[in-house]
Image: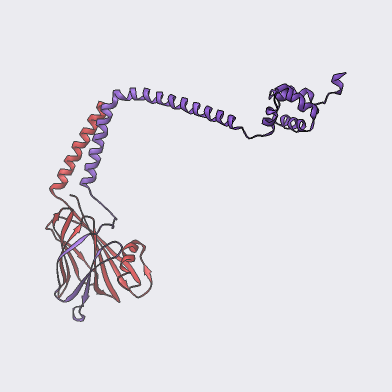
Chain colours: A red, B purple
Amino acid sequence: MKILFVIIISSIVFLHTFIASAQRSPAVFIKVDVIYASNERAFIDKKISRIVNDLKSLFAYSNYELIDIHSLETKYHQTGQIPLPNASKLQIVPLAEQAGYILLNVLVNRSNGYIMNTNFRIINGGTILVGGPRYKKGVLVFAITVETMR
Amino acid sequence: MESSSRCKYYKLVGPFVDNELSDSQKQDMALHVENCAECFNEVNKAQQTGLLIRENLIVEPTNDAMREIWENIHTELTNSHNFKTQQKRSVLKHFNKAKFWISAAAALIVISVGTLFYSFPYKTGNLQSNHCFVESIDSASASIMVFETPKNKMTVFWIFENESSS
Ligand SMILES: [Zn+2]
């Protein structure tokens, strides 16, 4: 029993050391699903059905295709860049962490200037959607999920 | 003389009264006793009462019998409960020796697991909580509207591009 006790104590010490090291440089994980929405046909990609079922109640598109997935690891005040299909760019900068929320700056850039610049606080692990930029016969929708270790 | 005129069931009266017959024999005998005055009287005599014949004919137990059955069941249950309690006590006696260490280990496991969950609040693939507060928003060439989806409460930034900018 004493051996078990020692094992538990040492694993807790290890765990706390591991957590402390993780807290020194918190990584911010960003995942972006690039979705093409149009009325070309009636099709919904199963991988994004949950998002699409929600979106359908707001917008009248019949075709939703997942055309790209980007995952990147960044840090606070470090810009994460994601190339978009319509020759534009998505720039994401985690600014701070505030009580379980992550303060982010998101910029959608076209060659001739930005079409959106926003600051928002999102709950750790939450997802936001950015939609509307024209692409082919429809529009693009970006599902941005942000997670960090505390 | 007497034995030759006796009913052929006569020799079964004793075993019937003493409940020594098989179920089918008992049933035959009970039916016979209902129709044979001689056997009926013999059975009555043997028991000094006609109650037993009724008990053998009617399967339903009397209230007294039911009470007895329940008393037996109660006794059985009480005994087995006492036995289990005794067993528990002896297990507890053993447990007391290791109680401190088990409690300490359990508490530490709870603390460490709690720490783990508190420190890694990952909700991969969980879109149930998408709380978002928009602090600022602007565009050089487009109009932007902000919505919230009805189910997953996801904030939606919708960019309405002008013709010239696309
Ligand atoms: Zn008879």
- The one nearer the camera, A73 or A105, is A105
Residue A3 is situated, as x and y percent measured from the top left of the image, at 25, 27
* Nearer to me, A19 or A110: A19
Q: Which residue is drawn at the image coordinates 28% and 57% (left, top)? A: B128
Q: Quadrant location of the N terminus of chain A?
A: top left
Q: Which quadrant of the figure has residue A46?
A: bottom left
Residue visible at 44% across and 27% down? B81
Question: In percent of the image, x 70 and y 22: which residue is there?
Answer: B48
At a point 18% along the width and 42% down the height, the residue shown is A18
Q: Quadrant of residue A106 in the image?
A: bottom left
Residue B93 appears at what percent x and percent y? 33, 22
From the viewer's side, name the closer residue of A44 and B12. B12
Taking the image as shown, residue B160 lies to the left or right of residue B65, namely: left
Q: Which residue is situated farthest in the left direction here?
A: A77
- In the depicted structure, whether residue A83 falls above or below residue B107: below
* Residue A49, x across and y down, in percent: 34, 63
Q: Single out the residue that lies furthest toward the front.
A: B49
Q: Is residue A149 above or below residue A111?
A: above
In terms of depth relative to the viewer, which is nearer, B132 or B41? B41
Residue at the outermost bottom position: B164
- Image quadrant assignment for residue A17: top left
Q: Is residue A96 left or right of residue B81?
A: left
